[in-house]
Image (cartoon, rainbow, N blue to C red):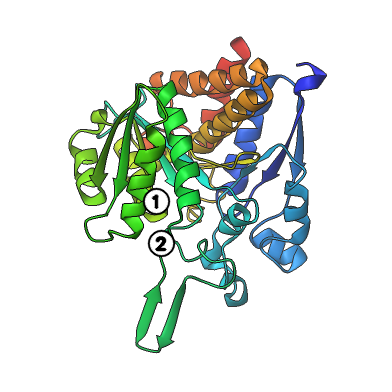
């Protein structure tokens, strides 16, 4: 790879199975690119608490600001000591600090994987900065509070600016796929907040010629997703709805172990698998690394487009193809009904990469 294409990527292992799947992802990215990645390991999670007294030290946040992107392993903040469970979890804090307003979550069935929905091939574009998520929708403090011991309130925030930018992300993506966009909302019972989201998305979509645009209530969309997922191409929705629907879509495609995800703004991006830290699997070499490996491919593809660097785009395509070919050959981890360990699955992917 030419010097021009060298990229600096943060590597954050996190908790539970994080170290295993992050290391497996690094090996696959290195093989796909051949050279040209400067890795910057950074602490987060319980290991960071043990060394620095914080699950997300300032040195990690400061270093991330100077990188081209980063790969984030899962964190298990529920297992932290009480004083470290308070406040925003590490992943949410990173998203908020760097304004990663778009969460791109594809779901597709792979040949060789038993999927509840063999025809699923869609992308959920989730607004990632506000909505009904209390850790993201306030400049200070939480959007969730208790005025009395017996009353709990939650503030949902929807702004035109956030709706416009996520709608542009979704429309631009749909234009590169099958040109079908579905706006998912709940405007029938939340006419002001969800009505604003729906209407702004429709306004933005008018600027993209050739798109077929529809909208659905979130409950109807969930039922439709189970009944006929092949009808969908790109779905755009608010934070909470996007979280729920993308987990459902991941299971329909075969397993959350295949559920990739990219968090991004106009200038920065973070690869982060949808699944959690799975502490019961940690250290047993049984975790499925495919979701994070596919997430890393999404990161490389985005960087390739932004840098006009075809080498990064090719590397992303090669990772996708190598994982698909590995799964099609019958090599899979236990969550997919297979017998392969984390390292065995990764070695099969690497072997295919090194043949191309």
Residue 310 screen position, x and y as percent:
64, 16
102 or 213: nearer the eye?
A: 213
> Which corner quadrant holds the C terminus?
top right
* Numbered circles on residues, count: 2
Residue lying at 51% horizontally and 29% vertically, measured from the top left: 345
Q: Which disc number belongs to residue 225?
A: none
**Observer able to see residue 123:** no
356 or 222: nearer the eye?
A: 222
Mark 2 sits on what residue? 132
Q: Is 106 placed left or right of 282 in the picture?
A: left
> Which corner quadrant holds the N terminus?
top right
Residue 145 screen position, x and y as percent:
45, 78
Mark 1 sits on what residue? 238
Q: Is 303 placed left or right of 2 in the picture?
A: left
Residue lying at 38% horizontally and 76% vertically, measured from the top left: 153
Mark 1 in CB contact with mark 2 (< 8 angstroms): yes
Please say if 56 is above or below 201: below
Residue 116 screen position, x and y as percent:
25, 35
Disc 1 secondary structure class: loop
Residue 248 screen position, x and y as percent:
31, 45
Spot the residue most to the top.
356
Neighbor class of circle 1 (other Cα within 10 Å; few <14, some 14-19, many 20+) is: many
Neighbor class of circle 2 (other Cα within 10 Å; few <14, some 14-19, many 20+) is: some
Residue lying at 77% horizontally and 49% vertically, measured from the top left: 63
Please say if 131 is above or below 183: below
- Dividing the picture into quadrants, the one containing residue 32 is top right
Residue lying at 60% horizontally and 10% vertically, measured from the top left: 355
């Amino acid at each position: 790879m030419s010097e021009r294409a060298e990229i600096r990527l943060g590597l954050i292992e996190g908790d539970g199975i994080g170290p295993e799947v992050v290391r497996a992802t690094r090996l696959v990215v290195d093989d796909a690119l051949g050279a040209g990645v400067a890795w910057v390991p950074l602490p987060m999670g319980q290991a960071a608490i043990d060394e620095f007294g914080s699950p997300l030290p300032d040195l990690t946040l400061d270093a991330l600001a100077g990188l081209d992107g980063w790969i984030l392993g899962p964190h298990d903040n529920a297992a932290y000591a009480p004083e470290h469970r308070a406040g925003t979890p590490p992943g949410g804090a990173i998203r908020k600090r760097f304004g990663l307003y778009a969460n791109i979550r594809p779901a597709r069935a792979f040949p060789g994987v038993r999927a509840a929905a063999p025809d699923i091939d869609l992308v959920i574009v989730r607004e990632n900065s506000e909505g009904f998520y209390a850790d993201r929708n306030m400049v200070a403090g939480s959007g969730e509070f208790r005025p009395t011991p017996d009353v709990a309130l939650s503030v949902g925030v929807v702004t035109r600016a956030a709706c416009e930018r996520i709608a542009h992300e979704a429309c631009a993506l749909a234009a590169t796929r099958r040109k079908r966009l579905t706006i998912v909302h709940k405007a029938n019972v939340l006419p002001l907040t969800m009505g604003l989201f729906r209407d702004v998305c429709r306004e933005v979509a008018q600027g993209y010629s050739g798109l077929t645009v529809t909208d659905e209530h979130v409950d109807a969309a969930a039922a439709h997703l189970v009944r006929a997922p092949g009808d969908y191409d790109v779905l755009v929705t608010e934070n909470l709805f996007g979280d729920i629907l993308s987990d459902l879509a991941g299971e329909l495609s075969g397993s959350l172990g295949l559920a990739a995800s990219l968090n991004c703004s106009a200038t920065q991006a973070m690869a982060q698998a949808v699944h959690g830290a799975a502490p019961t699997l940690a250290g047993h070499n049984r975790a499925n690394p495919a979701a994070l490996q596919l997430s890393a491919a999404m990161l490389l593809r985005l960087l390739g487009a932004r840098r006009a660097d075809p080498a990064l785009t090719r590397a992303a395509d090669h990772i996708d193809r190598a994982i698909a070919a590995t799964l099609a050959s019958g090599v899979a981890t236990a969550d997919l009904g297979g017998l392969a360990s984390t390292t065995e699955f990764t070695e099969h992917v690497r072997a295919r990469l090194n043949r191309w």
